[in-house]
Image (cartoon, rainbow, N blue to C red):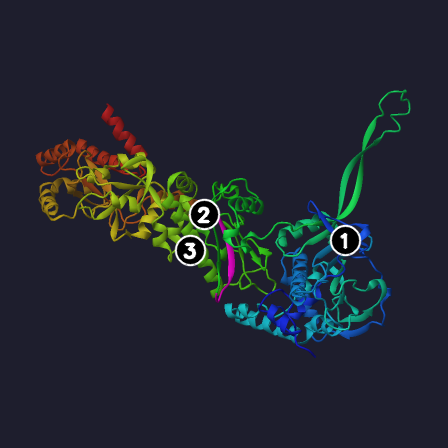
Amino acid sequence: PGTMVSFPHSRRNGGKVFGLLVACALMAPAQAFLSPASVPLATRRHGAVSLRPSLRVPAVSPLRMMSDTATEPEKFEFKAEVTRVMDIIINSLYSEKDVFLRELVSNAADACDKKRFLTLGQEDADELAISVKADKERNVLIIEDTGVGMTRDELINNLGKIAESGTKGFSEMLKKKEAAGSEEEEVNLIGQFGVGFYSGFLVADKMTVTTKGLEGDGKTHRWESEAGQSYTVAEVAGDGEIATKSGTRIELSLREDADQYLDDFKLKQLVQKYSEFVSFPIRIWSSKTTYEQVEDEEANKDLKEGEEKKMKSVPVTTQDWEVQNTQKPLWMRPPSKVTAEQYEEFYKSTFKVFDKPLTLSHFSLEGQVEFKALLFIPTEIPWELTSNMFDENSKNMRLYVKRVFINDNFQELCPRWLKFVKGVVDSEDLPLNVGREILQKSSVLRVVSRRIVKKSLDMIDDLREKGGEDWDTFQKNFGKYLKVGVVEDNENRKEIGKLVKFYTSADDQKTSTFSEYVERMKEGQDVIYFLSGEGRAQCKMSPAMEKVKDNGYEVMFAVEPVDELVMMELNEFDGKEIVDLAKGEVKGIDDKSEKKEEKKKAQVDFDAVLKYLEETVGKEKISKAEVSLSLTDSPALLAQGENGMSPQMQKYMKARAVAMGEAESEADLMGMGAMGPKGVLQINPNHPIITKLKESLSAGAGKGTPDDEKAARLLYHVASLRGGYEIEDPAEFASLVTGLMG
């Protein structure tokens, strides 16, 4: 009984070591079984491989019958619980059958990589390449490479012992994970079980591996299994031998429902999706149809002497090897060796877009966690984000392991407020699950995610420092994402806060950052003021703007619900508190000692008016009525309480409740119109309407006339309307206005 050997191409996978050079290569010997054989020397022509008969090289993947065995096949039994493991691999471990080609090609690339290390300096070394060919007549898919291959003993140890320690350990680990359900148990599965090779059984009833090891007696052996209880191993001679010094040929006898993998177009799609950046050429045997001009014999029957012969086009189908992975992994090169044109071409081809990137970041991290990354900020909003700015299917970040594509839908790799940033991340240290399809939560992932966020912020900050059209374009298209980042990213809130921009009362056309606002602050101003509204026009017409009219303080406009949330989450910037101008008592304006004394006297003087307004409007609508000495032109203002919710936020919450189905009746919606503490009705003691009401109440010994009641109610409605609140009783408001017209 031997020890389980791990197959996926990961540093975490250990195994038997062939020698010092193999150990230096840090690759498990189990990966050796993926070394294809007999790849012909060939010349490339415009992305294809043209085989020249004069080279006298055997064609790749000659289809051989199994009668070429030099010895009688020796039968071996899988050990206990193999049925359970095979069932997990075939039915549960992988979410898509397509990944079998990724696994086998990736491991073939590992075998080639290992052979490259072992044959350094050898002049007669084999060409390292991977070939894929479909035999439709036999219903067989063949994957070959010229990698390091395996000897007979290695073949048995690497492919025959999954059911020994591997199966039992795998099963026990699954049981532990199911019982514990903890994150640590999940992480413990990573890299412990070599299942990449066995993904072939997702599409095949039988797998045949023919291989010759680089080290050993130079003999070729064949391993064969139908994912049952046993497998066979036999020596191969004659035409079935591996022609190169070493290599591996894997033949998949496809199931009836897997015939799409015999289509060269399907195979090209999968290779280009998963393996387009593999270091070694991946060749696919492809059919190509061209059209040739030949004489049209039928049309030329009655051709007269001297007349030009008529021609026709006829299709000619040829087969040839085509290299699929011609694009180079740009992120693996030093940034100093890459031109702007190359970055742009890579961005457009990789993400299938037409715009140019505004900026990019090409970096690597070395140490305990190692990875390379290339990030881009687009010029235009990606089309998939135009209807939903957080579309989960946007696939903005592509994850690679050793240049092999794994997935592009890892939500944990990049926070959603950076959904617009496109990029690639390539690392051997990312904690994939045993199927290499799911990214586990771990400290490694947090390090990668934090670095992506930091580099993204650096890119955005560079745009801010440069300013100009690029910065304006970024803010126009992606400024809202930064505001979401302020709300959701606790760790980077202050850094993101430096980058967000708002319209202000100082300029109708341009937006400003908090830093720019602070630079323009008036002498003696120690807080930042903002005001919520459905647009700049509504903010400007709000009675609350009168509070800063005399001192000329600038006000930031929060014209979207997220703007107000940004103000609430930041709370302060550069040591200066962010204050809502629509509050009942505004810091820096209403809290000055001289105003407090003056307001105290006015409260006494207008006590009858305040009590009458509270009684007439009703305590269910306002918490209280008070005098405001900050109002200059308006008779009244409906201000928020200390913990009140702005009218814009109330409307947003109501709309959200409807969308989420939280409001079951019209009464529920009406109740949401007054979320949070009730407003404060502030009056301007110097306005004619207020002084007239005071005089009328004084004449009636505190009792108002019917006209006074109408005036009080209309005063409340107008204050609500100008403050951005919805009119709770439109019928009453219309009646009061109509009465004035009569």
- Residue 95 appears at what percent x and percent y? 62, 58
Rate crowding at label 2 as few (under 14), some (14 to 19) or many (20 or more) other CA atoms within 10 Å: few
Q: Main secondary structure of the magenta part?
A: strand
Element type where label 3 sits in the image: helix
Residue 511, placed above or below residue 252:
above
Residue closer to the observer: 14 or 214: 214
Residues 694 and 570: in front is 570
Residue 452: image location, x then y, percent: 46, 55
Is there a contact, CB below 8 Å, between mark 3 and mark 1?
no
Give percent across and percent down for residue 455: 44, 54
Image coords of residue 579 (percent x, y)? 25, 48
Magenta region = 367-376
- Disc on res. 454: 3
Between marks 1 and 2, how big is the CA–CA gap? 53 Å
Alpha-carbon span between mark 2 and mark 3? 38 Å
First in residue order: circle 3 vs circle 1: 1
Q: Which residue is mark 1?
A: 134
Quarter of image, res 635? top left
**Of callouts 1 and 2, the N-terminal one:** 1
Q: Amino acid at mark 1?
A: Ala
Magenta-span inclusion, residue 350: no
Left or right side of 673 for 439: right
